[in-house]
Image (cartoon, rainbow, N blue to C red):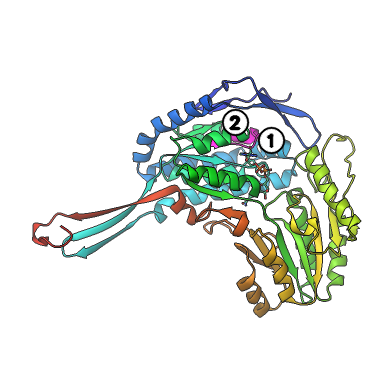
Amino acid sequence: MKYPPLQNYINGQFVNASTDHSLPVISPLDGSQLSTVPLSASKDLDDAVKAAKAAFPAWSRKPIKERVQVFFRYKYLLEKNMDELAKLVQEENGKTYSEAVAEVEKSIELTEFACSLPQLVTGEILEVSKGVECRTEHVPLGVVASIVPFNFPSMVPNWTIPNAIALGNCMIMKPSEKVPLSCVRLAQLLKEAGLPDGVFNIVNGDSAIVTAICDHPGIEAVSFVGSTKVAKIVYQRATSNYKRALALGGAKNHLMVLPDAKPDMTAQNVAASMSGCAGQRCMAASAMVAVGEVDHIITKICEEAKKIIPGENLGAVISKESKERIESYITEAEKQGAKILVDGRGAKVAGKENGTYVGPTVIDYVKPDMSVAKEEIFGPVISIMRTETVDEALAIENANPYGNAASVFTQNGGMARYIIDRASAGMIGVNVGVPVPREPFSFGGWNESKFGVGDITGKSSIEFWTKLKKSTTKWNPEAGVNWMS
Ligand code: NAD
């Protein structure tokens, strides 16, 4: 094992979980065991909530301008430790080093946004009648929880950590049991940045601890990022316990390619979108709708896909089970009559025989009712469906239950606007394969890709992590007595 067994992080200390149960942490790059992660019990969660509750009064009473000073330092520490953080992400998740660097860079951008929060939460004040003022303030909720998936071990935790904590909350983080190492370093860097003990805590575990979080009376709000199946479970359970909840789920993002699209640019973007992070992005292009005559672009997409080599510029998928699942989707589509133009099954990387790699895969002549067209595959696979018209393409996109992202490739601005207006997704790209909104714009899908109100990052997250206090004040006796008195 490369690293010692992991512990929980409670009240500024790394402590053993109260159970002996643990899971191995395996590197997808070569199948080697990196560490073990404890499966915590509810007593461990109780300890973390107790620490967070104790830290809350002092932390929440600090002016936000003081609280964000921690995040100015944290941002600097993320930059200073970039190489180490990126290597850790790469090791535990399997993505390429440059993708891991991009993920840490995005964590830095998220932190920069949190540093700007004092400018955005000034509240409002108005003299509503002579001598009477109404004022609104954003007040933190208390102890909040963040449950995160495996595909971005640094970025997704940082979707919630800087904003929720800078806004005055204390947090319990539940990392993915598949990639729990990065959060350990984040905790260390937060402490080094001066975050008081108890404000940020980590409780490791699997579904049992997620259930305990949803049920815990000391936790005010739960944010979740992961599959739709679990997002539904978490949203339902947390809200049935009267907690505020925001649960981001899976995705099936459609790219619509029109005949007037720029061939080279489109092909490069489609190939990068389907294969980046080995297709394990909730923003990945997973289905392409070829509208009309675009064979020349499909040929170029295949050429681009063939330049993507497992172990070189393509990382591993998270586990043996994932590799098998992805490959079985491809095999099923082939049996149903789809045409495999580029086949990533059986990929091997010399010297890393136990790594879990799937090569880029392009499947053509997919029908909308096939599993590869409807379901999230979460691998470097694109399924191409063909239609005659844009409206048919939109009908396919609209019929999908997810709604994270959709993109169109065209040179026609009017047609792009037509599609922006009609696509049923929260994030739309025009000639952009991965339309992730950059800060200060917020990130969040629609339909079965997100449950709850508001978005998880950017300005919209302020509403989720705070509640509004409205005060009405009158100091001047001459204001007199009226219906407000
Ligand atoms: P997952 O749903 O399996 O796990 C997410 C978290 O939930 C983990 O911390 C896990 O321990 C916990 N969990 C797993 N099963 C549970 C259960 N039955 N009850 C309670 N908790 C449970 O997701 P994953 O495989 O780690 O991540 C991949 C998924 O996340 C994909 O579907 C991807 O699209 C999605 N994702 C979505 C977004 C988004 O912004 N919408 C972003 C990143 C990832």
For the magenta stretch, what is the residue range? 172-186
Point out the quarter of the image occupied by ligand 1: top right
Taking 106 as reference, is 384 above or below it?
Answer: below
Q: Label 1 belongs to which residue?
A: 178
Q: Which amino acid does label 2 sit on?
A: Asn
User: Which residue shows up at 77% across the image and 64% down it?
Assistant: 288
For this view, does 23 lie left or right of residue 472?
right
Q: Mark 2 points at which residue?
A: 204
Q: Is residue 297 left or right of residue 200?
A: right
Quarter holding the N terminus is top right
> Please, is residue 465 above or below residue 5 in the view?
below
Q: What element carries label 2?
A: loop
The x and y percentages for residue 29 are 79, 37
Q: Position of residue 413 (x, y in %)?
A: 66, 78
Q: Residue at x 75, y 40 (%)?
A: 318
The quarter of the picture where residue 154 lies is: top right
Residue in the foreground of this view, choosing between 189 and 420? 420
Q: Up-down: is 38 above or below 153?
A: above
Q: Tell me the crowding category of disc 2: few under 14, some 14 to 19, or many 20 or more residues within 10 angstroms, Cα based.
A: many
Residue at 23% x, 64% y: name it: 128
Quick check: is the Cβ at mark 1 less than 8 Å away from ligand 1? yes
Instruction: Give percent across and percent down for residue 411.
Output: 72, 76
Residue 73 numbered mark, or none = none
Q: Mark 1 is on which residue type?
A: Lys
